[in-house]
Image (cartoon, rainbow, N blue to C red):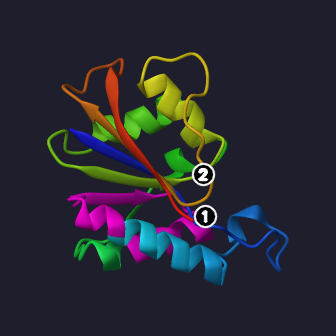
Amino acid sequence: MELYLLRHGAAESRAASGRDQDRALTDVGETAVKALLEQAREDGVAPRWIVASPYLRAQQTARIAARVFDYEEPVLVSTRLTPESAPIDLWAEVRDMDPDSPLLFVAHEPLLSSAASWLLGESRVIINFRPGTLVRIDFDSIGVTPQGQHAWTLHGT
């Protein structure tokens, strides 16, 4: 199974509401994410499912991904992908999905860097998820404990 982890694009530093979950992508963030995902599409990325955090910036990023990948299903929403979630929560989301289909999860830091390390069996952070970073992790099987292999990382501009 192919698991793609995507950190949302660059977002405004503060929402008008003052709530972190309401922060929107900036124009630069939208443009950079679109370019990154177009490159990923050219490289063969074609998720069967897109799942995103309920936070606005992740939802906006997921909608860009849906357009770029000609994704026709609804973007799924999961509270397991919020910044304060634990890697085991993200893995539970993977295990609840179709294990034979490529999955794209759109989420946040610090979840993504800690989850990627855990999924790869590392105890320290090994991938820097700056805004607009896409990582592919491959799994031979979807068991209780993940045993992923890092395939590649794309960083947006």
x%, y% of residue 96? 29, 40
**Residue at the farthest left position:** 100
Q: Is residue 25 above or below residue 99?
A: below
Count the marks: 2
Residue at 39% of width from left, 34% of height from top? 92
Horizontally, is 56 left or right of 3 in the view? right
The part of the chain drawn in magenta is 39-65
Task: Kindly identify the residue that appears in the image at 49 percent across and 70 percent down.
Answer: 33
Location of residue 74 with respect to 54 vertically, above or below: below
Disc 2 or disc 1, which is closer to the eye?
A: 2
- Image quarter of residue 142: top left
In reply to whether residue 56 is colored magenta, the answer given is yes
The dot on residue 108 is: 2
Q: Amino acid at mark 1?
A: Tyr
Residue 95 at x, y = what percent? 30, 35
**Badge 2, how many Cα within 10 Å: few under 14, some, many 20+?**
many
- Rendering quarter of residue 8: bottom right
Quadrant where the image shows the C terminus? bottom right
Q: Determine whether, in the image, residue 132 is placed left or right of residue 52.
A: right
Disc number for residue 31? none
Q: Nearer the viewer, residue 19 or 111?
A: 111
Q: Secondary structure at mark 1?
A: loop
Among numbered discs 2 and 1, the one appearing first in the sequence: 1
Give the x, y percent position of residue 27: 63, 83
Q: Name the residue carrying label 1.
A: 55
Q: In the picture shown, does residue 92 fall above or below 69?
A: above
Relative depth, front residue between 65 and 54: 65
Would residue 85 appear left or right of 92 to someone viewing this image? right
The answer to whether the residue labelled 2 contacts the one labelled 1, judged by CB atoms less than 8 Å apart, is: yes
User: Is residue 85 in view?
Assistant: no
Q: Is residue 153 located in the magenta-colored stretch of the structure?
A: no
Residue type marked 2 = His
